[in-house]
Amino acid sequence: MPHPVLTALGLQATESGTYLGNGEWADGRDAGILEPVNPTNGEVLGQVLATSEADYERIVTRAQAAFREWRKTPAPRRGEAVRLCAEALRTHKDALGSLVALEMGKSKPEGDGEVQEMIDIGEFAVGLSRQLYGLTMHSERPGHRMYEQWHPMGVVGIISAFNFPVAVWAWNALVAAVCGNISIWKPSPKTPLSAIASMKICNDALKAGGFPDIFFLFNDAGSDLAQAFVDDKRVALISFTGSTKVGRHVGERVAKRMGRSLLELGGNNAIIVDPTADLKLAIPAIVFGAVGTAGQRCTTTRRLFVHESIYDDVLAKLKTAYGQVEKRIGDPTDAANLMGPLNSREGVQAYLDAIEKAKASGGTIESGGKALTDRKGNFVLPALVSGLTNDAEVVQTETFAPILYVMKYSDLDDAIAMQNDVPQGLSSALFTTDLRASEQFLSAWGSDCGIANINIGTSGAEIGGAFGGEKETGGGRESGSDAWRAYMRRQTNTINYSDALPLAQGIKFDL
Ligand code: UN1
């Protein structure tokens, strides 16, 4: 019997991981089987039939054919298709949020929050479908008009990570769809069921609304198909979310074939707490940033710089708060719990290795630092580590687990310099009530990250802004603002309505 959370979404114990279009799901078993594991108890949640090479070819061919039609559909009409998806996601929010919590291991409110992000980006994309604006320019030549317009790219590839198994797809796919693209999704092998459920919800809504296929899905049991996908010239854009290590490889491969890539890679995000900070805000923001999603967001708070005058007080308050969190670690589908398990055994090992390294480098474990071996599943205690400097190797490394390195500073310039002194550049925050400190942090000589916040934490970004970061975070931007441009090609048009042929720059070429 499948888990009731799967049943609620109409999923069986064995599901196809391949959506071929035309309502068909592949049923071959030859390409291997994925077995996503419930991180709460180690039990296999279901079987997902992986995609064969032949079926991958079928998907790309069908996606290309679908694009030839979809690009002719007016953008506001494409928006209507996305509106139906957002509406269907709203109807299924509770069930899909529960599946995300179950399969990924994040808390139920965070699972629901992820589905809310899908709905929000869908609604954003509907509005966007009437706002894909280009500029008009004044030509230097008489009787000439210049303007630019934005055309769809074609087939867009989306490779998503286990930590946001559904929202990141929606950020990409729903925006890409109103832009006139067809998308092919390769989800994380750790969370294929959440992907299948999302596809079914959206594709059913499209079909009921009389729309054609615009979303395809494949699952790879190994990494051969994913490699082929990245190298596939027919895929105009690869949007990759995941580790810096894999992202670097993806970026290089896509660049080699002169494709376009959008990279959302690792973060090593910091919060600075200055002497004027309102600790009523700072403490819960730090704890949610460090402990939320069990430290498995790319925006998770991993480093904390506290002014020396309040350091002892802040550390004591954090220890108390961590003690409260410890009492509410457990089954993420139970809404009473604040923290679920890590997604995988490897995640637990990475956490334990980092704790050992922190100790060996002279760090003090102020709270947590252990795996919970008294129960099944991948549970760990969130860790607070003091006594390390920002240049320690373990502090410079993104460990995808709830470990917060707490450091002291005396001068804001130094704190900002330390915050910036990591390879990654995703998210950052300053807690202050001092206008000068706030403006310095947000200035060109302040935070070097793609996201810089005042008096809110590093994670939990809204979809309305462009999301992404600099340096080894990869430079990509997706979701809101004008991130849609990444999914379109710009065309500059000059129209001569005069009866002469003047050349630009005054060049004479008289025959
Ligand atoms: C991610 O961790 O990959 O800002 C994305 C946040 C979420 C998205 C995180 N809105 O935490």
Image (spheres, rainbow, N blue to C red):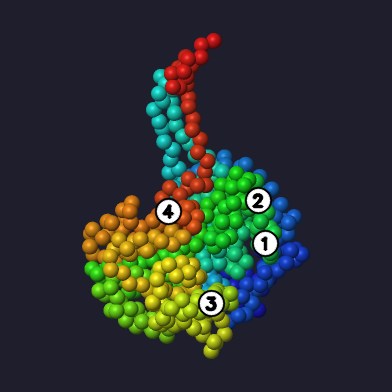
Nearer-N-terminus badge (3/1)? 1
Nearer-N-terminus badge (4/1)? 1
Question: Mark 4 is on which residue type?
Answer: Ala
Q: Which residue is mark 2?
A: 231
Q: Which residue is mark 4?
A: 466
Label 3 Cα neighbours within 10 Å, binned few <14 / some 14-19 / many ≥20: some
Label 2 Cα neighbours within 10 Å, binned few <14 / some 14-19 / many ≥20: some
Nearer-N-terminus badge (2/1)? 1
Q: Is residue 91 visible?
A: no
Q: Is mark 4 within 8 Å of ligand 1?
A: no
Picture coordinates of residue 201, whole percent (x, y): 56, 62
Q: Which residue is mark 1?
A: 223
Quadrant housing residue 455: bottom left
Quadrant housing residue 429: bottom left
Disc 2 element: helix
- On residue 353, the disc is 3
- Give me the C-alpha separation between circle 3 and circle 1: 26 Å
Residue drawn 45% across and 49% down?
483
Quadrant containing the C terminus is: top right
Question: Mark 2 is on which residue type?
Answer: Asp
Q: Please say if 483 is above or below 433.
A: above
Label 1 Cα neighbours within 10 Å, binned few <14 / some 14-19 / many ≥20: few
- Give me the C-alpha separation between circle 4 and circle 3: 34 Å
Picture coordinates of residue 56, whole percent (x, y): 70, 55
Residue drawn 38% across and 77% down?
387
Question: Mark 3 is on which residue type?
Answer: Asp
Disc 3 element: helix
